[in-house]
């Protein structure tokens, strides 16, 4: 366990009061997607390696960090340690292995990686295609009338961020079969070459597993389950689990709902499907800390977006003091 993160006076004692463990235990589950080698002005929600390192050092110093399967079981049994936390990653990005894994190993922090299996070995998700488009489109007018978004003027990083947000918001709830091909056509029409190494390879997935990290399922193609017919949703949930288990030769016991907002992105029927598929626990993106009142197949979690150790630590404390919602 690394000792590089300086202690924040009084934080550990306050966390112990707010999350005493046992039957009154609470669980902070953090969401990450990517850890970037260096900061990217278009990916302000993803930490760079230096930021991620101090975050993991702070967690290692102040929390008892557990793999999700163990943490969910102990939450249900009432045997959580004080200051329990989990670190989770969604989607299956290659930098989870190349950048995040060495930091996790150096700090002694276990993590759970939810992988959308369709994008292994050279795949690319629709949102990343749109981000790459927003990064590379030339300055000047950007005509998106073909996809119903009119014309944008690109002259600054702020314009590119606005373009990216507009594109992702527009595409997110479109039919899954149309999202990626339409996004790729946008890039092709603009002459933009798209990367094919954003997501993990099968070898990297196996390396994560061999390093002792927990692998969880995230469906196959990452659809919004609430927009799927029941049979299609069940097939997506099952296929992601089956493919991972075949690749790893090991059971996959935890699941993350794509996008993850209750009612909007998944419904009670999908919670039942996840349980029926044999998952021991599942996580949403409802921003809160978990306690024993939470359903084991829709545990809440939240994104740690604060820029300094003190604010990051206070955010985690606030989530435990007010466990039913983590505000801005």
Image: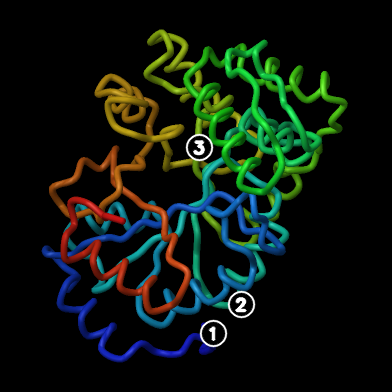
Q: Are marks 2 and 1 in contact (CB under 8 Å)?
A: yes
Q: Residue at x 74, y 20 (%)?
A: 186
Measured as percent of width and height from the top left, residue 42 is found at 64, 49
- Viewer-nearest residue: 277 or 110: 110
Q: CA distance from mark 1 to mark 3?
A: 29 Å
Q: Residue at x 28, y 23 (%)?
A: 267
Characterize the local packing of mark 3: few (<14), some (14-19) or many (20 or more) Cα atoms within 10 angstroms. Answer: many
Q: Is residue 40 above or below residue 103?
A: above
Q: Nearer the viewer, mark 1 or mark 3?
A: 1
Q: Is residue 78 above or below residue 276?
A: below
Q: How is the image coloured?
A: rainbow
Q: Residue at x 49, y 72 (%)?
A: 55
- Disc 3, SS: strand
- Viewer-nearest residue: 74 or 116: 116
306 vs 159, left or right, is: left
- Viewer-nearest residue: 190 or 60: 190
The residue indicated by pointer 1 is 2
The residue indicated by pointer 3 is 217
Measured as percent of width and height from the top left, residue 241 is found at 52, 31
Q: Are marks 2 and 3 in contact (CB under 8 Å)?
A: no
Q: Residue at x 42, y 60 (%)?
A: 304
Measured as percent of width and height from the top left, residue 139 is found at 78, 37
Task: Find residue 106 and name its label.
Answer: 2
Measured as percent of width and height from the top left, residue 120 is found at 70, 35
- Disc 2, SS: helix
Characterize the local packing of mark 2: few (<14), some (14-19) or many (20 or more) Cα atoms within 10 angstroms. Answer: few
251 vs 134, left or right, is: left
Characterize the local packing of mark 1: few (<14), some (14-19) or many (20 or more) Cα atoms within 10 angstroms. Answer: some
Q: Quadrant of the C terminus?
A: bottom left
């Amino acid at each position: 366990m690394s000792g590089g993160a300086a202690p924040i006076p009084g934080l550990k004692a306050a966390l112990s009061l707010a999350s005493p463990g046992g039957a009154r235990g609470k669980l902070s589950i953090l969401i990450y997607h990517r850890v970037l080698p260096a900061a990217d002005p278009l990916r302000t929600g993803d930490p760079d390696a230096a930021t991620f390192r101090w975050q993991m050092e702070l967690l290692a110093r102040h929390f008892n960090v557990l793999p999700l399967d163990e943490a969910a079981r102990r939450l249900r049994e009432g045997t959580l340690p004080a200051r329990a936390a989990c670190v989770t990653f969604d989607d299956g990005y290659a930098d989870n292995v190349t950048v995040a894994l060495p930091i996790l190993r150096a700090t002694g922090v276990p993590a759970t990686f939810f992988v959308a299996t369709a994008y292994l070995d050279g795949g690319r998700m629709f949102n990343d295609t749109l981000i790459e488009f927003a990064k590379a489109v030339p300055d000047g007018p950007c005509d998106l009338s073909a996809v119903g978004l009119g014309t944008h003027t690109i002259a600054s990083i702020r314009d590119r961020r606005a373009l990216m947000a507009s594109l992702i918001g527009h595409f997110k709830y479109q039919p899954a079969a149309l999202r990626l091909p339409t996004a790729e056509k946008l890039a092709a029409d603009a002459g933009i070459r798209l990367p094919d190494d954003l997501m993990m390879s099968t070898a990297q997935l196996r390396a994560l597993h061999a390093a002792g990290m927990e692998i969880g399922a995230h469906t196959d193609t990452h659809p919004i389950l609430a927009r799927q017919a029941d049979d299609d949703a069940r097939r997506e949930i099952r296929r992601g689990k089956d493919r991972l288990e075949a690749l790893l030769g090991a059971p996959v016991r935890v699941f993350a709902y794509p996008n993850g907002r209750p009612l909007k992105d998944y419904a009670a029927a999908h919670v039942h499907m996840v349980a029926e598929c044999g998952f021991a626990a599942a996580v949403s993106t409802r921003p809160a800390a978990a306690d024993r009142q939470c359903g084991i197949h829709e545990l809440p979690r939240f994104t740690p977006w604060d820029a300094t150790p003190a604010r990051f630590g206070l955010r985690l404390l606030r989530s435990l003091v007010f466990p039913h919602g983590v505000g801005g």
